[in-house]
Each structure stands twice: as structure tokens, then as C-alpha cells.
Image (tube, helix red, strand yellow):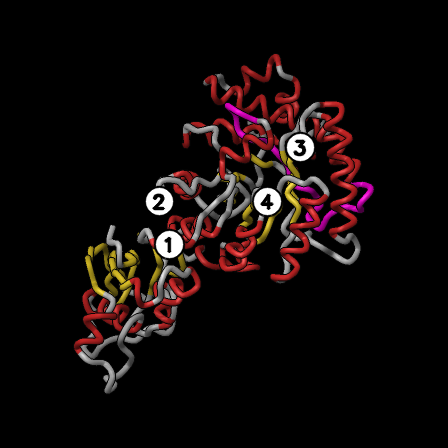
């Protein structure tokens, strides 16, 4: 890895040659524009120009993936696809996530020479590690606060998504905490609504958490959704910490990566990073950004826990993509920066075996909303079924066999019908 350059890998589709498209991207995102200008000297280009490092041709197609692309004179009707690697001088923008994004993912998506473009990966120099310290807690810190080792951290999401009345929420949290549940999070739709202000919610929930801890000896981790304006983030964070809370949650794309980095500078508890809105950046395979690249920026900015979707979920994403996302979160980055992958979306005890088989790790947070709260014997049984699902998975015992002596798992299999 170069100490003074940022490397970006793109998937490119173009009616032109890949070489021409790569040169256009490099020029647009560094020293060039649509026509030569007086200040664009050879010396300037040498000092500040983006550089095409590698071009790997892939396949071709006879129709453009995106609208608005132009074709060269005498176009043969084919659109070339390939992987293009560019590097950018660090001194163009410095170790700054906002300005890095302007360089590697700015106006290039609108270039007419491109009928498809996706940022696949980034390699960043050590200067970014000096500027952004990354997660303060990560996997180890989350495990220490929840006192959960050698298995996934298991939790649920408050449902209905829009939330509950404060007294109903406190009652649910108390019952779940008594059952031994590890973690609960607010839904992304519920932060600080007028009908249930955050201050009121924090007081009620933490009272329930502390009362349950007096009985169980374990303190449940509750991730309060503090998403809001920059000044609200600090106030909301302090509100949670002062009440004895051990986690805050933000919708990363709502507050932006700079907002996440700002929160991380003063946060005293783990930051649960939710990736809602992510689909609009990635669902089209010929457009947007790959999670491999995005998660590096989230980790730099300080996400201790990061959503990765779930296997066999209700969303569009393939299981293979989810597995890559889980692995990406724990891949080395500057010798650390580990963040806990948060597996969620239509999860239940029956998704544990597939998750473990695909990843061979228990260093995940596995969340089930309806898959736990809607258990026929109640939420506590739903939590027990999740533990049993993972026990069976790690021991290599088929679910239907393990369920014979574990009624909670049997109830889950009967309820969700996917044993």
C-alpha cells in the first residue's frame, strides 16, 4: 500500500474502450475537466493527477445498464465491462473522509462516457489511521459490557417499528432482561418522536434494566436511537450515559460519516451503526458502492457494531453478499478497527445454522424482532430458542434433532415453518 496515495477499484461499463473510460474518470476526479484550461500544466498533472494503475476486462453487453450514456462515433453496439484500479495523490484532499468521497465517488457517476459504475474497494494510507482512531469498543468491548463470550450476542428489536408507549416498552424490556437477553435496540424508525420523547424513554428503559439487573446480576445492553442533528447527538448521547446506558445507535446515512466520526470523538459507550437507506446505494449491481468499501469508512469513523443484513432475510440481498459483508467487518484494517457484524432482518433460531456454516464464527450480533418477540410461548422463549439454535449450529446437530429436548426451539420451528 502506498503511503501517499489512495487506491480505488471500480466496476466500469462503457460504450468506449475501458482505457478511455478510465482516463476520463482519472481526469474528472483530479486535474481535468471537459476541455483544456490554462492552469492544467504538465507539472500540475504530475503532482495532482489521478493515475490508472490497472485495467481488467470482463464481459460485454449489447445494451447499457444505466440511462443517459453516450456512444462514440461508429459505435459497434457493445458495452465493455471491467475492473479499473485508479490511485489518487493523498495531498489532493488529505486524510479526510468527506473529501475522500468527493474524490473517489463524486461526479464520476454522472459521466456520460459511463453506462455503469460501482466503487468496489478502497486502500487507504496510514494517514487515515492517524486521523481516525476507529471503534473504541468493537467486538471485545461489546462482549465485555454484555458479559457474553464464546457465543453470538443475541438480541431483539423493539416492535412495532414505530415504537411502544413508554410504560409498555419498559415492561417489555424488564421481562426480556429477566429472561437473560443480551441486547435490545430501538428500530431505526423510532428515535426521539414527540409522542415518546427520548428523555422519557431513556429514564423508563434504564429503570427497567437496572431493576432486572438486581435480580439477574447481568445488565442488558440497550441501544438507544439517538439519530438527529449534530447538536442533538451530543445531548442525546449524554442523556443515555448519565442514565447508565451502555450503547447508542445512529442511522449512519442519516447523520453522515462525518457525523459518526464526530460522535465517536466523545462517545463513552459503543456506537451501534444502522445502515438503513443502504439499498439505494447498492441494489443495482452496475451502480453505487460495494459494502467492502463502505464498511471500511464506517469502521474508520467509529462504528463499534455495524449492520450487515441476514441470511435468508426479507430483503433482496443474496446470502453470498451477506457472508462477504460479515467477513469484511472483521478483516484486518490498519492492524485493528474490528467492528461487530450485526446480523438482522427476518431472523430466527432457524437461521443460526446457515449463518454459522457460512461464516464459521460466533463473533456476530444476531438480532431477531418478530423471530423472537412473536414466539408462541412469548419473548423469553424466543430468546431461549435463539440460544438453542446457535448451540445446535456450533455442535453440528440438526435443528429437528436438537428440538426434541428443547421445547423453545421446537416452538420456534413450528411457528416460523422453516425447520
User: Looking at the picture, how far across and down is residue 395, in whole percent?
Assistant: 47, 17
Q: Residues within 10 Å of mark 2 (few under 14, many from 20)?
A: some
Which residue, given by chain and number where applicable, does mark 2 sit on?
A: 334
Q: Are marks 1 and 3 in contact (CB under 8 Å)?
A: no
> Which comes sooner in the sequence, label 4 or label 1?
1
Looking at the image, is mark 4 or mark 2 earlier in the sequence?
4
Closer-to-camera residue (403/325): 325
Q: Earlier in the sequence, mark 3 or mark 2?
A: 3
Residue 313, percent across and down? 53, 41
Residue linked to disc 4: 268
Total marks placed: 4
Where is mark 3, residue-wise? 220
Q: Residue at x 74, y 35 (%)?
A: 173
What's the mark number on residue 128? 1
* Whole-number angstrom distance, CA of label 4 to CA of label 2: 23 Å
* Image side of residue 212 versus residue 355, left or right: right
User: What element does badge 3 sit on?
Assistant: loop
Mark whose residue sits in front, 1 or 3:
1
Q: Is residue 76 visible?
A: no
* Label 2 vs 1, first from the N-terminus: 1
Q: Residues within 10 Å of mark 4 (few under 14, many from 20)?
A: some
- The crowding category of the residue bearing disc 1, from other C-alpha atoms within 10 Å (few below 14, some 14 to 19, many at least 20), is some
Front of the two marks 3 and 2: 2
- The single residue placed furthest to the top in the displayed view is 405
Residue at the spot x=62%, y=31% of the render? 416
Of badges 4 and 3, the one in the foreground is 4
Per the rendered image, the range of residues in magenta is 148-169
Amino acid at each position: 500500500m502506498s503511503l501517499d496515495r489512495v487506491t480505488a477499484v471500480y466496476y466500469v461499463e462503457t460504450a468506449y474502450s475501458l482505457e478511455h473510460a478510465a482516463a476520463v474518470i482519472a481526469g474528472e476526479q483530479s486535474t481535468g475537466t471537459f476541455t483544456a484550461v490554462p492552469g492544467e500544466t504538465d507539472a500540475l498533472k504530475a503532482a495532482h493527477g489521478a493515475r490508472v494503475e490497472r485495467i481488467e476486462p470482463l464481459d460485454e453487453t449489447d445494451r447499457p445498464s444505466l440511462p443517459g450514456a453516450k456512444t462514440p462515433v461508429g459505435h459497434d453496439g457493445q458495452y465493455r465491462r471491467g475492473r479499473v484500479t485508479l490511485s489518487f495523490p493523498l495531498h489532493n484532499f488529505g486524510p479526510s473522509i468527506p473529501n475522500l468521497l468527493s474524490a473517489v465517488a463524486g461526479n464520476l457517476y454522472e459521466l456520460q462516457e459511463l453506462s455503469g459504475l460501482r466503487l468496489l474497494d478502497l486502500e487507504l494510507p496510514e494517514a487515515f489511521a492517524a486521523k481516525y482512531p476507529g471503534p473504541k469498543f468493537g467486538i471485545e468491548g461489546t462482549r465485555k459490557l454484555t458479559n457474553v463470550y464464546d457465543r453470538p450476542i443475541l438480541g431483539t428489536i423493539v416492535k412495532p417499528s414505530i415504537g411502544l408507549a413508554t410504560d409498555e416498552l419498559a415492561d417489555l424490556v424488564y421481562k426480556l432482561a429477566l429472561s437473560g437477553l443480551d441486547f435490545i435496540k430501538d428500530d431505526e424508525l423510532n428515535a426521539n418522536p414527540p409522542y415518546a420523547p427520548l428523555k422519557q424513554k431513556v429514564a423508563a428503559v434504564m429503570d427497567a434494566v437496572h431493576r432486572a439487573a438486581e435480580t439477574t446480576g447481568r445488565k442488558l445492553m440497550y441501544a438507544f436511537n439517538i439519530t438527529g442533528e449534530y447538536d442533538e447527538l451530543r445531548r442525546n448521547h449524554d442523556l443515555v450515559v448519565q442514565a447508565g446506558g451502555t450503547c447508542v445507535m445512529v442511522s449512519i446515512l442519516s447523520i453522515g460519516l462525518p457525523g459518526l466520526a464526530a460522535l465517536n470523538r466523545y462517545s463513552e459507550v459503543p456506537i451501534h451503526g444502522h445502515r438503513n437507506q443502504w439499498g439505494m446505494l447498492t441494489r443495482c449491481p452496475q451502480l453505487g458502492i460495494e459494502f467492502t468499501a463502505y464498511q471500511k469508512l464506517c469502521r474508520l469513523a467509529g462504528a463499534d457494531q455495524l449492520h450487515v443484513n441476514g441470511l435468508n432475510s426479507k430483503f433482496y440481498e443474496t446470502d453470498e453478499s451477506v457472508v462477504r459483508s460479515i467477513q469484511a467487518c472483521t478483516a484486518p484494517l490498519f492492524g485493528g478497527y474490528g467492528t461487530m457484524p450485526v446480523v438482522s432482518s427476518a431472523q430466527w433460531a432457524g437461521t443460526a445454522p446457515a449463518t454459522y456454516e457460512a461464516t464459521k464464527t460466533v463473533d456476530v450480533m444476531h438480532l431477531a424482532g418478530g423471530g423472537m418477540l412473536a414466539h408462541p410461548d412469548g419473548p423469553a422463549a424466543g430468546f431461549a430458542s435463539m440460544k438453542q439454535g446457535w448451540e445446535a449450529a456450533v455442535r453440528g446437530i440438526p435443528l429437528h434433532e436438537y428440538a426434541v429436548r428443547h421445547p423453545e426451539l421446537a416452538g420456534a420451528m413450528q411457528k416460523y415453518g422453516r425447520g
